[in-house]
Each structure stands twice: as structure tokens, then as C-alpha cells.
Amino acid sequence: MNRAGPVILTVPGLNGSGPSHWQTLWETSRSDTARVDLGMWHGPHRNSWVTKLDQAVRTTDAPIILAAHGLGCLAVAWWAELAGQAYGWPVAGALLTAPPDVDRPNAAPELKAFGPSPTTALPFPSILAASTDDPWISVDHAHSLAVLWGSHFVELGDCGHVNAASGVGWWDEGQELLERVINASELNSSTTPVIDARSVLAAKLDGFSYARHL
């Protein structure tokens, strides 16, 4: 499909995104938006999610903007660390919303499986948005992740986990943030082709210790 702008790929988190979640509403209302089916929504496997995301990126026309929520943000960060893409291509930007704290000592096993949090700056412009009362992460730790990943940090106020239960609905502010990411990606646009990220990713996943991290 020919598009004037980038393709928006939503990346849900643990348990997926239900019919009232802003990601689902965006997918059903915007012709440029589609979901990455990571599978294993209730029992995620880090390597599987990274591989599924990589497949979605490689089979989608670039440029791509990722709109991730919850644990999906960690999937994006791990993909970026392992894939080795060139800056801004094919993923040109990302909106990362409400990442959980996978480093917390009492984090659920499903979250710990994605720890420790990646520390490499993302190879594309990004915004990390978090609320001040998210039960899954403190706003200070969310800000720390933004610093590590080179993301612009946006404090959302009292919005819970920024999901359907938080009552954000369509999430107009999120649409505004998405447009900011798109504009930033256009300013940083490049026709430089991606390096052989597929082989880089496969090699790194093969060398990743399941026993240690999963």
C-alpha cells in the first residue's frame, strides 16, 4: 500500500491490548496503523517477542514508527539493542508509553524475563511517556530509562498505566506525541540502507543465555 507518511506499528505489552485500549482504537481508526502480533501475550518469551518484532519490521514498508505500550517498550528496546539497524532506518522513530520496571526486585516473573533493562541508546528519535502514578514503574525510574535510551521524556501526570483501565480512551495526547515523533523522524530522515540486521540479530539471540535471562 502506498502511503505519504510512515507506517505505524503498535507493539502491545503483557496480555495484549483489548478493544478499548488506545492502541486498538488507533489500529481501527487509522489506515496507516497495524498491530505487531507478538503472540504469547500471557506468557511472553523475550527472544520470541524480539524475533516477531524483527519479522514485522522486515516485512513492512519503511519508514516505520513504533507505538509501544507496557512490556512492548522493553521488546522495542531489546530489538534495537540486538538488531543493529542503521540510525533512523527502517524504524524511523518510536513512542514508548508506560514501560514497566523489569529491574524491580519484586517484579512479576513475566517482567523479570525482560530484564535487565537494555542500556543502549535507541537508533531512532523517540519519546518515552510515563505517568506519575503508574503501579508498574516509578516516574523516576521511567525517566532513567528515557535517559539510557536517549528518549525525550514526557511526564503525563496521574494517568495510571495509560491503558483502558486508566480511562484515556482514544488518548488525544498520545496522538499529539505520535505526531511529534513523526516530525522528528522526518527531520532525521535518511536513505541510508539498513545493515544486515537480520544476521546480527540471529547471532545475538543465539548467544543469549535463556537460563540467565528467561
Image (cartoon, rainbow, N blue to C red):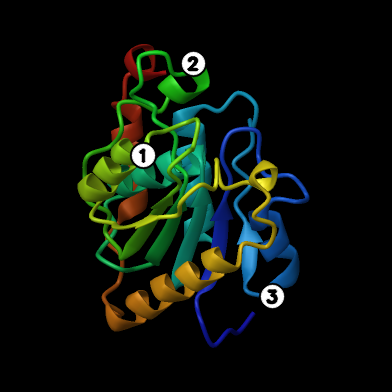
- The residue to which callout 1 is attached is 202
Label 2 to label 1: alpha-carbon separation: 25 Å
Residue 201: x, y in percent? 34, 43
Q: Residue at x 36, y 39 (%)?
A: 202
Q: Residue at x 48, y 59 (%)?
A: 66
Mark 2 vs mark 3: give the one in front. 2
Q: Amino acid at mark 2?
A: Pro
Say which quarter of the image contains residue 154: bottom left
| Above or below: residue 97 compared with residue 87 | above
- The residue to which callout 3 is attached is 31
> Of the residues under marks 2 and 1, which one precedes in the sequence?
2
Quadrant the C terminus occupies: top left
Q: Nearer the viewer, residue 203 or 77?
A: 77
Q: Amino acid at mark 3?
A: Ser
Q: Classify residue 169 as left or right of residue 73.
A: right
Quadrant the N terminus occupies: bottom right
Disc 2 is placed on an element classified as helix
Q: Tags 2 and 3 in contact by the CB under 8 Å rule?
A: no
| Above or below: residue 146 compared with residue 210 | below
Residue 67: x, y in percent? 51, 58
Q: Amino acid at mark 1?
A: Ala
Checking the image for residue 109, the label placed there is 2
Residue 78 can be seen, yes or no: yes
Q: Residue at x 50, y 31 (%)?
A: 135
Disc 1 is placed on an element classified as helix
Label 3 to label 1: alpha-carbon separation: 32 Å
